[in-house]
Image (cartoon, rainbow, N blue to C red):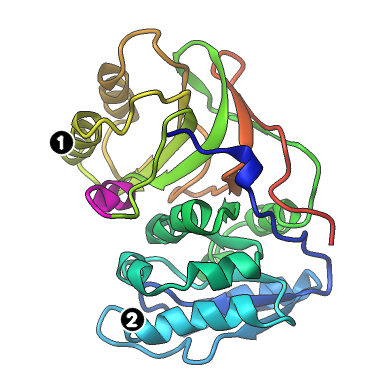
Amino acid sequence: MKPKPLRINKPQAVKPGDTLGIVAPAGTFDAQKLHEGIAFLNAQGYQTRLADGVFEAQGYLAGNDMARVEQLHAMFSDPDVDAVLCARGGYGSLRLLPLLDFTLIAAHPKPFVGFSDICALLLSFYFRAHMPTFHGPMVCSLGQEADQAGKDLLMKIRTRRPLEIMAEDAITLQSGVAEGIFLGGNLTTICHLLGTPYAPLLKGCILFLEDTGEALYRIDRMLTQMHQAACFEGLAGVVLGGFSECGPLDDIYALVGSIFPAKSIPILAGVAAGHGEQNVTLPMGVHARLDADRGTLIFLEAAVDEP
């Protein structure tokens, strides 16, 4: 089944001065880092609002499952909140999927930003609420990263212009040009969605993958599982982001190339998105064109509408 662009439920673009809601749907976080990220957002001219209970903790989780779900529900239903940003990833997003009210979220579409474990929500919001999302930095990293990553995030959630990503360290693993809905995220998290009702349907899509701290054999195991589960059937193309602390990139790229028949689809590596030092924001759930030979990823439509 190919995702249909006509089903998209686009949120409104964010404007300077708007209010950014902050939620913690996954793991616990460093409060100081969160405040540094909030200071960055305020300095860029945005208001911020913390979800109730955002500083709660239950072991490695940022509060119990229902409390974290209620953070999301509250921020999406609050008319004074214009976008929703995640404090941190870690682990915990998968636990929320059966508890979420996707009808409520679909009724109040807003730019939603996160990555890593949060990609379980990015994908589910697209397939269940038909809402584009943004794979990008989380609030706890904004005070630590170069200003450019945060400014790039804010630009992406407020612009309606088509976007072009030029991979500075582009490596063409397989040549070609392809178009499709751009979807994906953290390899480990996507693999953990297999066998659940929330497993993404990727036929006709350009699949983005990134990860961190995974040994080559584990990346092999996950890609092989996805391949044997027919996840890659009918893919339009593949884009690889950062694979930090995963061993030599050449070995990872060779492994990815071996999973797909030679010249079957375009595969581009070297996009600076994910757990590395750079984390460019990527719209998810919108139509894109991948040119693996030129090292470009062009988003043919905006992920947001005019306010």
Q: Residue at x 83, y 65 (%)?
A: 15
Above or below: residue 210 compared with residue 54: above
Q: Which residue is mark 1?
A: 217
In which quadrant of the rendered view does residue 94 lie?
Answer: bottom left
Considering depth in this image, is 43 or 236 the residue closer to the camera? 236
In the picture, the disc for residue 65 is 2
Outermost residue toward the top in this view = 263
87 is higher (above) or lower (below) than 233: below
* Residue drawn at point x = 53 percent, y = 24 percent: 170
Q: Quadrant of the N terminus?
A: top left
Residue type at tag 2: Asp
The mark that comes first in sequence, 2 or 1, is 2
Q: Label 2 neighbourhood size at 10 Å, few (<14), some (14-19), many (20+)? A: some
Q: Residues within 10 Å of mark 1 (few under 14, many from 20)?
A: few
Q: Nearer the viewer, residue 129 or 79?
A: 129
- Indicate the amino acid at tag 1: Tyr
| Residue for point 24% across, 34% down | 223
Magenta residues, start to end: 188-196
114 relative to 253 in the view: left or right? right
Count of residue discs:
2
Residue 266 rendering spot, x and y as whole percentages: 47, 17
Secondary structure at badge 2 equals helix
Residue 190 belongs to the span the image colors magenta: yes
Determine whether, in the image, residue 207 is placed left or right of residue 254: right
